[in-house]
Amino acid sequence: MNKAQLVEAVRKSLGNSSSRAESERAVGAVIEAIKTGLRKEKTVQLIGFGTFRVVERGARMGINPKTREKIKIKKSKTVKFSVAKNLKSKL
């Protein structure tokens, strides 16, 4: 499912009284709220769905696939998602 399909699913869930634009704003608001929560608190937990968490990847050595030359990869931050138990059991 991509963002457009998610917007359409939200519109259908809200019923005929909602427009596509309203649904798109709702999806956008949720995504922005998750981004803000990750920036400020480093964790966003949605009970029954899962947890988004900021984790730091350490610096490491890698290999350039074109030249096979060893390169240093800097440490970086990424987001990990852990699925909630009750959602996982329904998959």
Image (cartoon, helix red, strand yellow):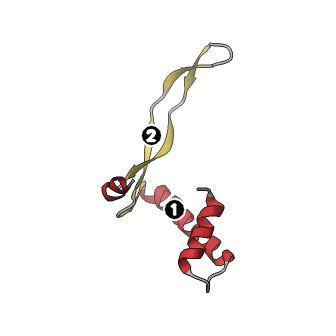
- Crowdedness near tag 1: few (<14), some (14–19) or many (≥20) residues, C-alpha within 10 Å: some
Report the number of discs.
2
Asked whether residue 28 is in view, the answer is: no
- Which element is circle 1 on? helix
Does 69 sit above or below residue 24? above
Percent across and percent down for residue 50 are: 39, 57
Residue at 67 percent of width and 75 percent of height: 20
Circle 2 residue? 56
Asked whether residue 49 is in view, the answer is: yes
Task: Identify which amino acid the numbered label 2 is placed on.
Answer: Glu
Does 84 sit above or below residue 59? below
Instruction: Please state, as top left, top right, bottom left or bottom right, where the N terminus lies in the image.
Output: bottom right
**Residue furthest toward the top?**
68
Percent across and percent down for residue 12 are: 58, 75
Q: Is residue 43 left or right of residue 61?
A: left
Residue nearest the observer in this picture, 81 or 78: 81
Point out the tag, 2 or 1, that comes first from the N-terminus.
1
Does 3 sit above or below residue 80? below
Does 42 sit above or below residue 8? above
Q: Are marks 2 and 1 in contact (CB under 8 Å)?
A: no
Residue nearest the observer in this picture, 5 or 21: 5
- Crowdedness near tag 2: few (<14), some (14–19) or many (≥20) residues, C-alpha within 10 Å: few
Percent across and percent down for residue 4 are: 66, 62
**C-alpha separation, residue under disc 2 versus residue under disc 1:** 18 Å
Residue at 66 percent of width and 80 percent of height: 19
Task: Identify which amino acid the numbered label 1 is placed on.
Answer: Thr
- Which element is circle 2 on? strand
Residue at 62 percent of width and 62 percent of height: 5
Image mark for residue 48:
none
Circle 1 residue? 36
Percent across and percent down for residue 18 are: 62, 82
Residue at 39 percent of width and 53 percent of height: 91
